[in-house]
Image (tube, grey):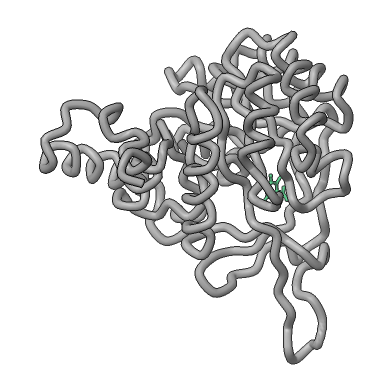
Amino acid sequence: MNAAGVLGISAPLLKRVYDGGAGAVVTKSLGSEPRKGHLNPTMVIVEGGVLNAMGLPNPGADYFIEAIKALKGDGVPVVASFFGASISDFRDVAEILSEAGADALEVNVSCPNVQEELGMLGADCANTEKVTAAVKEVSKPPVFVKLSPNVTDIAEIAKAAELGGADAITAVNTLKGMAIDADFRRPILTNVTGGLSGPAVKSVALRCVWDVAKAVDVPVIGCGGVTNWRDAVEFMLAGASAVEVGTAIRSRGFGVYREITRGMEGYLEANGFKSIDEIVGLAQEAA
Ligand code: RRO
């Protein structure tokens, strides 16, 4: 899958992700109202990755119903990522996206770039459990909960999401960082801080997947710095059952998805595995 936020703002772009070889596509996080997000600059290239502080720009869940239907009409499995301003708002948006026919919902409790109530609900176990339970009450498709790496103990948050009824955990959102321009002597992003993605975060994301996979029984979706098939295999060995790829589209293009799945197939064949399931969490047994 693509990582939420990356090219997730229109049906034609998501169709290109699918045509590039993704097994499913993930929308930009949608809210109950359209949102402009932060003023530019909202993105800056840094060492080993990209810092973004988009600020949840999105056209609103109602607007995206047609896009979900169009994608479904083209046979594309759709994961609808979304956020809420409160627990009841999370529930309302989940209901809209569930009714629209999304194949799964990904609850974003981990945006690093907006104020507390919209963003980092997922830094707290009790809130994570409550939001997950509220969303589960109204969702027909499976519910993934996307967690933040910017917490002390991600395993505890994952357990709370599982307790709330999560069907899978996505680990992880971006790592909070910042960039300063030495010549202008000021932060580059209007929001000052942003979320780091790309190869620079891979080791952190891999450790998060490892910790979450040990802590919960539901499947884990790995996300963070996956650039090639070897990265994807490593995430699966750590315990992920699927991966999301975002920043790598910048360097590899839409074909990155097919490159990764073909490379994984080659790895399975060369090492005598019959199914991808056989490698999920295999490295945990060696530790
Ligand atoms: O829009 C954003 O600023 C954003 C979101 Br919602 C998120 O979940 N993660 C991120 O890095 N940026």
Q: Position of residue 101 (x, y in %)?
A: 60, 12
Relative image position of residue 215 (x, y in whole percent): 55, 33
**Residue that appears at 82% across and 81% down:** 186
Does residue 145 lie above or below 2 as drawn? Answer: above
User: Which residue shows up at 55% across the image and 25% down it?
Assistant: 168
- Closest to the observer: 13 or 236? 236
Q: Can residue 231 be seen in the rendering of this structure?
A: yes
In this orientation, which residue lies closer to the viewer: 167 or 111?
167
Q: Is residue 274 above or below residue 73?
A: below
Residue nearer the viewer, 201 or 255: 201
Is residue 69 something one can see in this rendering? no
Q: Position of residue 199 (x, y in %)?
A: 47, 62
Of residue 123 and residue 102, the one placed in the foreground of this image is 123
Up/down of 188 relative to 139, above or below = below
Q: Residue placed at 46% from the left, 46% from the top?
A: 245
* Residue at the far front in the pictured view: 287
Q: Which residue reaches farthest bottom?
A: 183
On the picture, is 269 further left or further right than 6? left
